[in-house]
Image (spheres, rainbow, N blue to C red):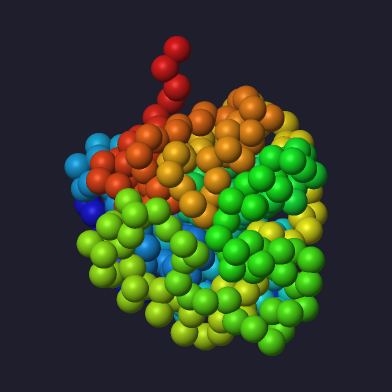
Amino acid sequence: MVCGSETTLAKLRDGRSLAYIEYGIERKLATHKVIVIHGLASSRHHRLPCSEKVVKELGVCLVGFDRAGYGESDPNPQRSIRSDVSDIEELADHLQLGDKFYIVATSIGGYSAWGCLKYIPHRIAGVSMIAPAVNFWWPGLPQDLSKQALSSRVLLDSLILNAVHHTPWLLNWWSFPSGPMHLDEVDIKILTESPIIKEISLQATQRSHRQSLNKDMLLQFGKWEFDPLELQEPGDFRVSIWQGDRDYPVPVELQRFVHKKLPWLDYHEIAGVGHLVVLVPGYGDEIISNLVLPREI
């Protein structure tokens, strides 16, 4: 049985609410429960585009939710990578997803996935990160590589990223634009063919730009509480990264270095694809199958 997409609110311990939807197989009948973490200027409505056939065959229930400050979820003035992880764990417990659940994270939502690997690996059954953003200032990245990647951004984007990292107080007076930074033409084509993306973006920021977009930028490109490049292999579950080689927001050379430092990652680089890997036809099925099916020996 494939369930619908009615929005529900989950009450958290601190009194805030998270808005979420469920889709795929009905939760109580599902074999695999997956929490989907959206990216910048997105929301619970940006589903992982899996076919009904694959979802039924694999027995997957997916849960999309508005991260704190997005859409219909209450903001968290003390929001951090750790607090976002706590929200995910509380949501999983509220929905009784079991001792372990899967994570799929897109773009800037990748920082929450890295946070789950750092803080709650014992709760995770598997992780897929789709074009996860890379912080140019992670200590484990070579400075020359980071500077080269940053300098390859158009001037405005480079100025924005440097301001977010070095002078974050400026975001108290300035709102990050809801649209994405410059994209490759392959991404622009996908966007023009997906009018729902613009609608989702407007819904995502309906409460506050500062508590959604600005906070995301500060957390992703500010000073981290840990360096993902020092994480140890989790051992009992798979962690995958899906990356287009024409991704502008996330330079492919940085993602290649992440994989070099963490060779235990399953790294999938896709030729001719930009940042919106998740919207390329067929990849939703491939990503979810790779996530929940056991490794071939």
Q: Residue 288 versus residue 34: which sits nearer the camera?
A: 288
Q: Is residue 31 visible?
A: no
Answer left or right for 262 relative to 248: right
Q: Residue furthest top?
A: 297
To which quarter of the image does residue 78 belong?
bottom right
What is the number of callouts on the image? 0
Q: Could you say where residue 149 lies in the image, as x and y percent from the top left?
A: 63, 47
Of 107 and 124, nearer the camera is 107
Q: Residue at x 53, y 40 (%)?
A: 252
Place of residue 183 in the rendered image (x, y in percent of width and height, measured from the top left): 43, 58
Q: Residue at x 62, y 78 (%)?
A: 211
Question: Image point 64% across, 27% down: which residue?
Answer: 260
| Residue 29 in the figure: left or right of residue 237 | left
Q: Is residue 131 above or below residue 229?
A: below
Residue situated in front as seen by the camera: 60 or 288? 288
Residue 154 drawn at (x, y percent): 55, 60
Q: Is residue 169 visible?
A: yes
**Residue at image location 64% in from the left, 68% down from the top:** 160
Q: Quadrant of residue 2?
A: bottom left
Q: Relative to 202, does residue 29 appear above or below in the rendering? A: above
Whole-percent x, y for residue 203 in the image: 40, 79
Q: Quadrant of the C terminus?
A: top left
On the picture, is 196 further left or further right than 46?
left
Position of 266 relative to 138 (above/below) = above
| The one of 295 and 217 positioned closer to us in this rendering | 217
